[in-house]
Every structure is written in C-alpha cells, then in structure tokens.
Image (cartoon, rainbow, N blue to C red):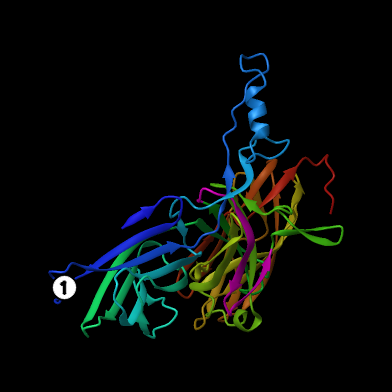
Amino acid sequence: MEWIPGTSLFLISARAITRQNLTAGADVRTVLVMRLTKPTLFTNIPVTCEEKDLPGDLFNQLMRDDPSTVNCAEVLMLGEMLTLPQNFGNIFLGETFSSYISVHNDSNQVVKDILVKADLQTSSQRLNLSASNAAVAELKPDCCIDDVIHHEVKEIGTHILVCAVSYTTQSGEKMYFRKFFKFQVLKPLDVKTKFYNAESDLSSVTDEVFLEAQIQNITTSPMFMEKVSLEPSIMYNVAELNSVDQAGECASTFGSRAYLQPMDTRQYLYCLKPKKEFAEKAGIIKGVTVIGKLDIVWKTNLGERGRLQTSQLQRMAPGYGDVRLSLEAIPDTVNLEEPFHITCKITNCSSERTMDLVLEMCNTNSIHWCGVSGRQLGKLHPSSSLCLALTLLSSVQGLQSVSGLRLTDTFLKRTYEYDDIAQVCVVSSAIKVES
C-alpha cells in the first residue's frame, strides 16, 4: 500500500499470475482506494516584527502580498483558501465514512465477468458496502470500474476495508485477489451522566428525576452542537432545562453560537417525570429503570455531520425500605427559641404487611421536639399513609438539621431511624421572619 502525497489516495496493487503466461510475465491489475473528504481552510504561519527592527516593514508587506492571507487580517493563521487533504485524516464515531474505489485494467487483454466487492470488517461484524453486486461483463485495457461507498461509523476501534476483485481471463481461467486497508475510528465525545432525585409529589412515588449530561469535545477541532436531546423511555415524560425565556422568546443558555471548542465541556440538564399510568404502579419504577437515551448531532469543519446515540441510560430508583417518611410542609426560616411546625407523612411501602407503629422523638443539641414521645400511631395498612403535625424549637442559630424521629413496628419489634430529615435556617428573634 502506497500513499500518494497531496491527496487522500492510497495505491493498492495486486499481481495475478496465470498458468499460461509464466514465461511471458505478469498480468497486473490495480485497485485505487481514496477517502472522500471535504477540503480544509488553509492555515498560514504569520511572520512579523516591529518597525524598529532590521527588516522594518518587509515581513508585513510580504504577508499583505500573500494571496492566502485575509485582507486587513494578515496576522491571523486562518486563510481564505481551501486545501486538499494531505493525509487520510481522522475518522470519528458517528461520522460517515466515504470512499472511492477504482479497479484499473493495466494489461493489454480484455477481462470478463469482473466483480468488485467492498466489505468493512469491524470487531463485531462484517458489512457489505458495495453499491452493486452485479458483475461487469468486460473490462478493456486501460479502462476502470469505479464505485463510491458510504457508511455511517457506529463502532470505535480498528476497521478493515476489504477490497476483493474476481474476473475471468481470455483463456477462461477465473482469477481472484483482494487487498486490505486498515484504519482507526476514534471517539469524538466523552459523555458522562449523573442522576439527581427530587421529591415533587410526596404523597406518591411520582418523584422527579434530574439528568445532568456532561459532553466533552475530545477532538482537535471545534464542533457546532446542532442538537442534544433526550429520548425518554415509555415510562417517562421529559422537559429540557437548557433554555431561558428572554423577552417572550426561548433562548439557549449557551448563547446563539453553540460551538464547543476542543477539550471543552458543556452540561445539559433534563427533568423526567413518570407517566401517570406507571406512577400509580409503584412496583414498576422501583429498582433499576430505563430512563432513555441521548441523541447528539454536531457538525465539524465545513459542515461534516456526525451523530451519536448513547445506549439506554439506567437509573437506580431510591429505596425507602418498609416505611417511608417524607415532609409535606416545613418553613425555610424560623426564630430562635420559638416553636415552629412541620407536617410529616408516613407511608407503609409494604404491599402485604400491616404495621402497628409507635412514634418516638429524640432531642438533639440544637433541635428540641415539643409533644409526647412514645405515642401510638395505630395500624397502618399496606400502601397506605398518614400525616402527622409536629412541633419543634431550636436553641441554636444557623442552619440546623431536623433529626431524631424513631418509628417502631410493634409487630416485628423493628425500629426505623430518621435523621437529617430536613434543614431549617434559625435566626435571632429580633429579625422578623416573613411568612
């Protein structure tokens, strides 16, 4: 395999020797493989100096006379001219690999029944990329058979383009040869995801899930992010949180120019809510659930388009055990040494067992409970809830954590402890707390 400078052309030659011409010499067939890529903008390295230096204005005048520089912006490296690809270049996952294949008859004989086949071998599969599988009746001397193949790259790692040619000589002998062209497919983006759980409706399990997607450009050229969306699974509805309302119009939080420079990272945020028919069936969204997949579309250089879809994102739903304690109401700010009220909801998450619960309240160094500890709450049937209005006061200023609730199931003699339920800001009583 030989690279032809100035192009993306690789010359692959094969020598087929028939029994009839061992003494007369070799019958040569040539296969040309060229990657079809768009040209790039010419880059020029500016050479300049100050006027007081020895060259004076000579370097600046040479740059102004250079046709490859931008008028009135000669010191910029980026020019206005286009250049042909000087090497094979990089191929990234999600892009379309295009290649031109030409089979040339170098001999002085007419060959018949020529069949050109192009396969792409990856680590997991072999794909046929030939536009046509029909054989050409004959190929005269110094004539070519041309084919253009396209393939959207969906795997990273080593790829091998296998070009196979079969034909029949004038003597009726069937000949066959093939050549291999190896290239690497690189990863263009680094995608990381994080899940955050938020309780939007404490009376049920229809909690919101926030997905943060961190997308980093790990190529050497900037990208125009055309689209980054989340395709949810059938269990969720999604709302994108990557835009703001400006004068009645929806504007992207990243600005009007959605360029992602090399090694830069951008964060996208999405809110997912379980659909009503699934939210009512708590067992369906417990444990590991499929959230959906990210669909990313970008453009590079002169508009080359790339697209990636992640695999299905999975989220582990939070487990609440047998009993779930959630807050229905709590003030943000309270006065020092003044009682304040909170409302709790206790849910029996078991689908089979009835509980007989006893409530105990344990004071901490800063938070003190007001009321009777050790009182009976009565029986709580499976998948049912009850609300409790509780009173507390704080003896220490600052951000204080509400802790110290204990629930005991008298049937199983099992105690459930709840600490760091919530936090409140405690201020001096001299400061008026707005209701």
Question: Could you tell me residue 114's position as x and y percent?
Answer: 33, 80
Residue sitting nearer the eye, 71 or 310 = 71
Task: Classify the position of the N terminus by image quarter.
Answer: bottom left
Q: Which residue is mark 1?
A: 21
Question: Could you tell me residue 156's position as x and y percent?
Answer: 41, 62
| Residue at image location 32% in from the left, 66% down from the top | 30
Residue sitting nearer the eye, 380 or 236 = 236
- Near mark 1 (Cα within 10 A), the count class, few <14, some 14-19 or many ≥20, is few
- Is residue 39 inside the magenta stretch? no
Q: Quadrant of residue 8?
A: bottom left
Secondary structure under the numbered disc 1 in the rendered image: loop
What's the residue type where badge 1 is placed?
Asn
- Is any atom of residue 10 visible in this view? yes
- Is residue 233 inside the magenta stretch? yes
Residue sitting nearer the eye, 373 or 209 = 209
User: Left or right: 260 with respect to 393?
Assistant: left
Residue sitting nearer the eye, 36 or 429 = 36
User: Left or right: 130 with respect to 338?
Assistant: left
Classified by dominant secondary structure, the portion drawn in magenta counts as strand
Question: Could you tell me residue 267's position as x and y percent?
Answer: 61, 54
| Residue at image location 58% in from the left, 45% down from the top | 42
Segment colored magenta: 218-240
* Relative height, residue 181 to residue 363 (above, below): below
Question: Could you tell me residue 297's position as x and y percent?
Answer: 59, 64
Q: Quadrant of residue 342?
A: bottom right
User: Left or right: 199 with respect to 354?
Assistant: right
| Residue at image location 29% in from the left, 67% down from the top | 179
In the image as oriented, which residue stretches furthest toward the right?
247
* Relative height, residue 363 to residue 311 (above, below): above
Task: Classify the position of the C terminus by image quarter.
Answer: bottom right
- Number of marks in the rendered image: 1
